Amino acid sequence: MRDSEKAGKVFEALKAAEREPAEKALPILNGLVGLVQGSGEQPLEVEEARSGAFMAICEVGKALHRGQPADQLWTAAIGATERWMSLTK
């Protein structure tokens, strides 16, 4: 699967998970791990954007797991994923 396809799937999953309660969103986020893992085959800028999206998604997951507010974290994760998507086109 190409990076652009992975980024698109991650974006769609994030948008869907954002609307769910934590107990349903967490498994969705956990399922994204394989899609956001890097292969090191992309240009550095793309790998950095992918890594940023991964870290932002992890922050959302941590907040949800701890029962903390995640509204701003969702925004950051979606924004980071959008940046990754824009670099893979």
Image (tube, rainbow, N blue to C red):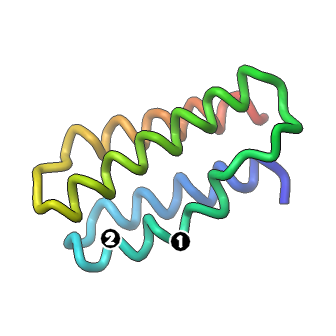
Where residue 71 appears, as percent x and y from the top left, is 19, 46
User: Which residue appears at 66% of the width and 31% of the height?
Assistant: 86
Q: Quadrant of the C terminus?
A: top right
Amino acid type for the residue under numbered disc 2:
Ala
The mark nearer the N terminus, 1 or 2, is 2
- Identify the mark at residue 80; answer none if there is no mark: none
Asked whether 82 or 55 is in front, the reply is: 55
C-alpha span from label 1 to label 2:
10 Å
Q: Which residue is mark 2?
A: 25
How would you rate the neighbour count of disc 1 (Cα within 10 Å): few for under 14, some for 14-19, many for 20 or more? few
Q: Secondary structure at mark 2?
A: helix
Q: Quadrant of residue 29?
A: bottom left
Q: Residue furthest left?
A: 68
Q: Quadrant of the N terminus?
A: bottom right
Amino acid type for the residue under numbered disc 1:
Gly
Q: Residue furthest top?
A: 45
Where residue 59 appears, as percent x and y from the top left, is 33, 46
Q: Which residue is mark 1?
A: 31
Where residue 32 appears, as percent x and y from the top left, is 55, 63
Question: Taking 22 as reference, is 29 left or right?
Answer: right
